Amino acid sequence: MKLPNYNQRLLSIEKRTQRFMLGAIGVMLLVLAMIAARQDYFSRSTAIYFITPNAQGLSKGMAVKFIGFKVGSVQEVSMQPNATVRVKVSLDDEYVHLIGQDAKARLVKEALVGESVVEIIPGSQQVKQVTQNSVLEFERGQDAGAVVENLAAQLQPILGDIHQITSSINNPGGDVQQTLKNLNLATGGFRETVNQFTQLGVSSNQAMGRINSSLETLDKAIPKLVDKADTTLDNVQSATADIRKITNDSAGEIPSLVRNANALVQDGQETLGGVKKSWLLNSLFTEPEEQILPVDGYVAPTQP
Amino acid sequence: MRSVVSILCGLVLLAGCGEVEVLRSARLEQATEFNQRAQRAFQRGEYQAAATLYEQALQIDVAIENVNGIAINTLNLARVNNVLGRSALAQRLLDQLLEDKALHHAPAHLAEAALQKALLRLQANDAADAALWVDRAAVYCESDCRMSGVIDNVRAGIALRANDADKALQLSERAVSANSGVPIEHANALRLMASARLMKKEAEVALRLLEEALVIDKSLGLPEKIRQDLLLSAQAYEMLGKNEQAAQYRDRAARIAATALK
């Protein structure tokens, strides 16, 4: 009596197990499909290559950017029989028409901190666009640390020079101070002569003679002073020219560093914002609200 | 049938995950940021900086007609201006809020405005007007009143000004239990109770209460309150005939006053 019932229950359990398994497989397939979509398996891409003497800083999955946009990723980094490194890059087809055969791949670090990326430097528009298995020229860009280090190394001797010049300006026995002292003495002598001329009423001939003599002294002193001042100014000019040169050299790198650091911070903020809004974590991050100061219900007596 | 129920349960569970996010404009977020920076400045005792930041938050709230924010930042601005000694400006701000006919403010905010107004009147030695405003605060605060402890403290303060030690004692005792979870008001209630005890010439009891208040005020880092505790303690020691200890407490209070920190 009981056996058919038991078999029926077994069948029902089997059916439910089947349904559960099918559901689980379905969910797994969905997750796999999502991962594949994320990994760009469904997007059409073009593989291009570049050759580099070593693989330092290069890794699989690294982003490939073109004018700041992600256009692909590094698919493979492999060593060749001739001890060079071949890097395979997968480019999204929608961007391929923008990249000419003469474009270059450059390894750059986006900011002082953070990941390196491969940046595609656009070639000329007239040249034919890259196609499957095209090979690009590769170069290594200076990373942020190296740029700052170079800048510091070049600035150091100039700062030393400037320090020396300012010390010489401040030195009481130095050229500039002496020049100023001489100038001061000369103008003092001249003033004294004029005073004597007006106050004591000496004869005009005598006064004119003394004025002439003072002017002669000035005539002799001024060219020397001007020469010394010229030398000092030349030194300063040469130092500022050096600084300008270094600044110009670094001008191309620094804005890009700042821009990249800014983009990195923005990316970080967006990621954090996204994490905060995800349903698993949003309960941990409550939205801030305007707060009210608590009332302080005590008034001090006028005379305690 | 069972599978239908399972699916429905699943959907209900998923609905829990799909919470509708409240939209917050960038302007509102900016106002919130100003408000939070002001709160931090206030806590550090940088009152001028706090006032400027509350003003900026209020300006944005007015521009986007965030009624809640308008009330909150007006109250905060009144409070900080009072601390800065600009009580007339504080009164004007509170009047703006209390007499606002265009916007409908929450009773809790109006209650707080009325309470701040009562404190300002008490500060100006106008105990009668202060009593009117504290009654008005109690009316606003009738339903879901979280400020009953503060109201009791203000009423106790008014009773002390009227030299009614018994009433002050009764109200401050009630305030002590009502404010057990709010350290600043708990210490205020203890100080008021000590003042009432001093008025009744019960110096030893007052000293014990003041010691308790002093510990709380020190933990909160409130120089003006610490000074008040020390001055009242000095008064208690004088009452006990311990003039040397009284002088020590006065000296300690004077040192705090010399820092000019509030």
Image (cartoon, coloured by chain):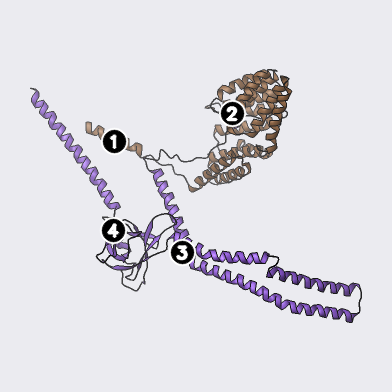
Asked where in the image residue B213 lies, by quadrant, the reply is top right
Q: Earlier in the sequence, mark 3 or mark 4?
A: 4
What subunit carries mark 3? A
In-image side of A301 versus B140 (left or right): right
Disc 4 marks a residue whose amino acid type is: Gln
Which residue has dot 4 on it? A75
Q: Which residue is found at the position 29% from the left and 68% from the top? A: A135
Crowd class of label 1 (few under 14; some 14 to 19; many from 20; radius 10 Å): few
Which residue has dot 2 on it? B216
Which residue has dot 1 on it? B10
Disc 1 marks a residue whose amino acid type is: Gly
B168 vs A283: above or below: above
Q: Which residue is found at the position 46% from the left and 56% from the top? A: A262
In-image side of A84 versus A182 (left or right): left
Numbered tag placed on residue A253 in the rendering: 3
What subunit carries mark 1? B
In-image side of A170 versus B58 (left or right): right
Q: Position of residue A205 (x, y in %)?
A: 89, 82
Crowd class of label 2 (few under 14; some 14 to 19; many from 20; radius 10 Å): many
Same chain letter for marks 1 and 2: yes
Q: Nearer the viewer, mark 1 or mark 2?
A: 2
- CB of mark 3 within 8 Å of CB of mark 2? no
What subunit carries mark 2? B
Q: Position of residue A113 (x, y in %)?
A: 43, 54
Same chain letter for marks 3 and 2: no
Q: Earlier in the sequence, mark 1 or mark 2?
A: 1
- Of all chains in the rendering, the one displayed in purple is A
